[in-house]
Amino acid sequence: MFRGVANLNLDTKGRMAMPSRYRDRLVETCEGRLVITVDRDGCLLVYPQPEWERIEQALMSRPNMDRQVRRLQRLLVGHATECELDGQGRILLPPPLRDYAGLDKRVVLVGQGNKFELWDEDTWVKSRDEWFKEEDETAEPSAVLESLSL
């Protein structure tokens, strides 16, 4: 499980050092091989390759005559890019993906269980604050969350 928030820097070549607390696990579970793709919220999704392959297989097995399925296939699979941790534990983020997420220098890596989200720092702070505000304005939890005790 990947959890926690890490504030990181991209170098001038667009490389990001994976926090050391995740490196060993990534090497053990996927030999440092990752897949990065886009997310509709404006961030990037970073998956260990075996986890991505399960998702990709499930998505591609859906009938692509359905417009929503085809849209997700185009976006997620179409932008999916394989990368590998280098000897210093860094990953190179391809320019098209950096451009999509507006990644320049300061980024935030957010653990999400089976994957990471990678955000531009300013976008992350703004979105996070909006989500907290939305939560405060919502009087009743959704039916999905009613039974969850935090």
Image (cartoon, grey):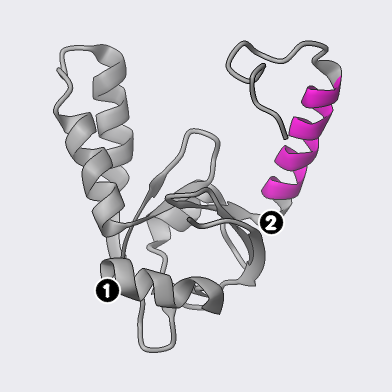
Seen at 23% across and 31% down, the residue is: 59
Main secondary structure along the magenta-highlighted residues: helix
**Residue found at the very far bottom of the displayed protein:** 87
Which residue in the protein does label 2 denote?
Answer: 121
Q: Nearer the viewer, mark 1 or mark 2?
A: 1
Where in the figure is residue 64, as x and y percent of width and height? Answer: 16, 19
Mark 1: amino acid: Glu
As drawn, is 145 to the left or to the right of 30?
right
Seen at 21% across and 32% down, the residue is: 58
How many residues crowd around disc 1 within 10 Å: few (fewer than 14), some, or many (20 or more)? some
Where in the figure is residue 19, as x and y percent of width and height? Answer: 55, 74
Element type at marker 1?
Answer: loop
- Name above or below for residue 102 compared with residue 27: above
Q: Which residues are magenta?
A: 123-136
Q: Residue 32: in sight, yes or no?
A: no
Q: Quadrant of residue 32?
A: bottom left
| Marks 1,2: beta carbons within 8 A | no
Which residue in the protein does label 1 denote?
Answer: 31
Where in the figure is residue 12, as x and y percent of width and height? Answer: 53, 78
Seen at 57% across and 52% down, the residue is: 102
Which is more toward the observer, 92 or 6? 6
